[in-house]
């Protein structure tokens, strides 16, 4: 309504800067307001009349059909205690704990109460990680809401059974479709991916390679080699990473052949020559060669634990060690990961390399790092450990923090540990032993969070 917009605009600017245009008002409003000399009174009079009209002055609509009801959902609501906990999570605004709670519910036969859906949908609108579990627990009522509010469209049941989803679906729908088809009909998924590859935006191409990462097969080598020449650096990097996970690729062998004349051993010294006559700066090119070559290339120079401790000449030692770390991460090589961690336990590559190790080896290595690193350094490392954590790693970290005194960095690490340890660790003695009166605030917060999470699981069991 032009009259209302003009009135609101005048009120926002103030009558000293703008006078209400009475000509834009309906005749009845104009007649009442014109009798006021003060511009502010004119504005208030017009506002009173128009507000009354907007509230009660409209004629009733004819031929109005009620909205269709949401489809029935026979699942029971979460138990009363879980419903109270959900209210506390929404009031406290803890998206990480809310995500965990929704994930628990998604694995049960329960659904969330309908009155909580608007708040949950608003939380998921700004935090995409909440959307998938919320759509699962919201059920048909969530889909009904998503069809009527564009901001909550992620709740609407996607037509992923339709053959058109790959062509016309949202990015989230296409990612789900691709992941599902890679698991159930891998040939169909790969054909669809190859058919639209060149027309996809760079960020989408990189994202789809991330989906493919969980379903790699040897026959993907040709496709990934093509992606190595992509115009986007992020796509090239992701393709090189995936090729590194495939054993015996042509690309890896080519990199090893180019690397071989550049490396030789002289006693306890590893002599490395910079690549010459190739596109790109020497150090950058060396990083590419070492990161892409199979780690078995280095076996002729000695076992991993010996090679990583050799004196390096001809190139910066850090370049070689960082590139070895990249190769170990790509190839998931535990022996090299252990060797690199042992050579530089406080290095920046240690946290991701820990993710390469098996559960028992990972926990044992973390226990060893506790004795080698200062408390401050280990506390910083906790923040960067890859997730999800295993039961063994979670127990090792809880054992470590149980022995610590008050310290700023320790208190920060406690927040991470309390929320990242898996459910199997929630009955650790730290959570079940009564705190003493002199326990610090961070230790109380740690215990409270562990118990809060344990109760979440028990209420929904």
Image: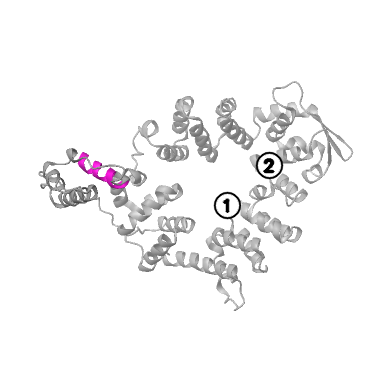
Of 372 and 222, nearer the camera is: 372
Q: Which mark, by number, is residue 387?
A: 1
Span highlighted in magenta in the image: 1-12
Residue at position x 33%, y 39% in the image: 159
In the picture, measured across the screen, residue 63 lies left or right of residue 78, that is: left
In the picture, measured across the screen, residue 397 lies left or right of residue 93, that is: right
Kindly report which numbered mark, 2 or 1, lies closer to the viewer in this rendering: 1
First of labels 2, 1 by sequence position: 2
User: Where the N terminus falls, by quadrant?
Assistant: top left
The answer to whether residue 229 is magenta is: no
Give coordinates of residue 383: x percent, y percent: 62, 54
Residue at position x 48%, y 33% in the image: 204
Any part of residue 364 in sight:
no
Which element type, helix, strand or loop, lies under badge 2?
A: helix
Give coordinates of residue 276: x percent, y percent: 77, 23
Which element type, helix, strand or loop, lies under badge 1?
A: loop
User: On the image, which quarter does residue 366 sit in?
Assistant: bottom right
Residue at position x 44%, y 47% in the image: 128
Of 441 and 434, nearer the camera is: 441
Q: CA distance from mark 2 to mark 1?
A: 18 Å
- Above or below, comparing residue 305 to residue 255 in the picture: below
In the picture, measured across the screen, residue 144 lies left or right of residue 54, that is: right
């Amino acid at each position: 309504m032009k009259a209302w917009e003009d009135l609101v605009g005048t009120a926002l600017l103030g009558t000293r800067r703008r006078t209400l245009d009475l000509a834009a008002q309906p005749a009845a409003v104009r007649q009442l307001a014109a009798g006021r000399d003060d511009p502010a009174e004119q504005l208030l009079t017009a506002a009173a009349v128009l507000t009354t009209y907007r509230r009660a002055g409209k004629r009733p609509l004819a031929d109005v059909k009620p909205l269709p009801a949401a489809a029935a959902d026979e699942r029971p609501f979460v138990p009363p205690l879980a419903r109270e906990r959900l209210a506390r999570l929404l009031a406290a605004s803890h998206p990480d704990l809310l995500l965990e709670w929704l994930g628990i519910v998604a694995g049960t036969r329960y659904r969330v109460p309908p009155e909580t859906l608007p708040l949950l949908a608003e939380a998921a609108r700004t935090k995409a990680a909440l959307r998938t579990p919320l759509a699962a627990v919201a059920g048909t009522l969530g889909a009904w809401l998503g069809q009527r509010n564009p901001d909550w469209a992620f709740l609407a049941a996607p037509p992923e059974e339709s053959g058109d989803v790959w062509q016309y679906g949202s990015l989230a729908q296409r990612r789900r479709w691709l992941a599902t088809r890679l698991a159930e009909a891998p040939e169909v998924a790969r054909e669809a991916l190859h058919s639209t590859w060149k027309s996809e935006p760079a960020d989408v191409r990189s994202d789809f390679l991330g989906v493919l990462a969980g379903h790699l097969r040897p026959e993907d080598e040709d496709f990934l080699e093509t992606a190595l020449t992509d115009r986007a650096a992020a796509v090239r990097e992701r393709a090189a990473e995936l090729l590194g996970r495939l054993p015996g690729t042509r690309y890896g062998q080519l990199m090893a052949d180019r690397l071989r004349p550049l490396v030789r051993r002289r006693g306890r010294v590893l002599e490395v020559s910079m690549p010459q006559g190739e596109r790109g700066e020497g150090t950058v090119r060396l990083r590419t060669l070492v990161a892409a070559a199979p780690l078995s290339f280095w076996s002729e120079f000695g076992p991993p634990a010996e090679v990583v401790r050799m004196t390096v000449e001809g190139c910066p030692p850090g370049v070689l060690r960082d590139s070895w770390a990249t190769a170990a991460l790509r190839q998931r090589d535990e022996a090299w990961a252990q060797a690199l961690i042992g050579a530089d336990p406080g290095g920046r590559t240690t946290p991701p390399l820990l993710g390469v190790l098996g559960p028992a080896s990972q926990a044992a290595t973390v226990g060893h790092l506790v004795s080698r690193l200062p408390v401050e350094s280990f506390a910083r490392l906790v923040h960067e450990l890859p997730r999800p954590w295993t039961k063994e790693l979670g127990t090792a970290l809880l054992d470590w923090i149980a022995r610590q005194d008050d310290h700023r960095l320790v208190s920060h690490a406690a927040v991470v540990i309390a929320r990242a340890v898996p459910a199997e660790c929630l009955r650790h003695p730290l959570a079940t032993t009564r705190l003493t009166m002199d326990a610090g605030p961070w230790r109380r917060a740690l215990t409270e969070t562990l118990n809060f999470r344990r109760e979440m699981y028990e209420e929904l069991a």
